[in-house]
Amino acid sequence: MARLESSAEVVIVGAGAAGLWCAERAARGGRSVLLLEKTPRTGTKVLASGGTHCNLTTTLEAKPAGELFGPEGARFLATGLRVLPPSAVRERFEQWGVPTVEAPLEKIFPASGRARDVRDALESAARKAGARIELDSAVRHVLPRAGGWRVELAGGRAIECARLVLAAGGQSYAKSGTTGDGYAWLRQLELPVVEPVPALVPLTSPEAWVHGLTGIALRDVEARLVGLDGRVHGRRRRPVLFTHRGVSGPGAMDLSIHVARGQARSIARGERPPWFVLEVDLAPELTREQLRALLIEGAARPGLPLLSRVLPLELPRRVLERVVAQTGLPPGDPRANSLDKERRHQLVEALKAFAIPIDGTTGYDHAEVTAGGLALTHVDPGSMRVRGREGLYVCGELLDLQGPIGGLNFQSAFATAELAGADLAR
């Protein structure tokens, strides 16, 4: 049995975005806080986020930001986003000496462009508030005891506390230390865990022609994820990037949770891939009728213009060739007057629903977050207290909350940590 070596008023497990924010808020409120991190440094995932630039929140207001988490997530986050909206996150970092700047797609970055400044500000604020941080302190078990909790660490140490906060993150990007330990602790406490899957992760395609478009980005498009039954699982108007394994970019990655869950179900049923089609609207500003009119007008022009000269779209040549191929014509850039009525119809459909077969994701090693976690029905949305487990709090990615790319998941981590820290301070 682990030997008892110390006690604390509040123990927080996980020194990531949520854990550091919660530690600062609780310590600032006068609580004695001990923050445990199993890796040699704090905020490893923060340091790697956004290509080491750290998209720390969004320009969106609280309500539209919450809606991007889905109906259940929006209801759960309503209090947190009211108490700590995105604008308040920016203000807090400004106070900590990290000015921020706006970027396309509603993103907010540190003005320096350095994720390290975000991590350093979080750690410094927690320490200045009085929180103690212990690195290389891996937790093995969390156990309820009379009047509080017992935290057992690797190496035989044990710490007792009145309040325990689990902010250990999910299991995406395992190199950062998020290896899914928290899910095991929750299950051992007989709490309901929605099965975790990788999310905000690139998608894979079995088609060689998709791999042949590696490096091509489609900037202004709408991506729709469609099941083989024709059901649309989600849509996002965001860029899509072709890769050597399939497709990436926010337009694809924002929809990846549906692929990951569908893939798991299909494998369990013994079904063979592909299981989805990513339909990309290459002309979201134009209706089918407008595209059809452009093709008819182009066919009547003198000089027999090429299709690329008729369409007001900035499509890479190789993508246009694949669009043409989906109509059954030889790949290339045909003359506008070479299309009969049926071919025009097929071309319009290909432009509005450029079909990319999808057979899975690239997995946890490439995922930005984990979807799944502690069921929201078992957490008080105003305090992050776990129902039926006195003195236990959960915040951040360990909750069954997942938003799209664009700083939303950091915002969720900060907002839930703010509520937990404030409740601990009270």
Image (cartoon, grey):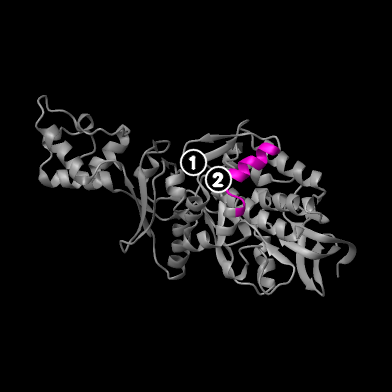
Question: Of the residues under marks 1 and 2, which one precedes in the sequence?
Answer: 1
Disc on res. 106: 1
Amino acid type assigned to the residue bearing label 2 in the image: Gly
- Tell me if mark 1 has few (under 14), some (14-19) or many (20+) residues whose alpha carbon lies within 10 angstroms of its own: some
- The answer to whether residue 116 of the structure is visible from this angle is no
Marks 1 and 2, how far apart at CA: 8 Å
Q: Does residue 311 sit above or below 341 in this rendering? A: above
SS of the residue at dot 2?
loop
Residue 229: x percent and y percent? 31, 64
Disc on res. 300: none
Q: Quadrant of the N terminus?
A: bottom right
Give 102 or 46, whichever is nearer the viewer: 102
Q: Does residue 26 sit above or below 93 in this rendering? A: below
Q: Based on the picture, tell me whether residue 367 belongs to the magenta stretch.
A: no
Residue holding disc 2: 407
For image coordinates 69% across by 41% down, the residue present is: 119
Magenta residues, start to end: 83-95
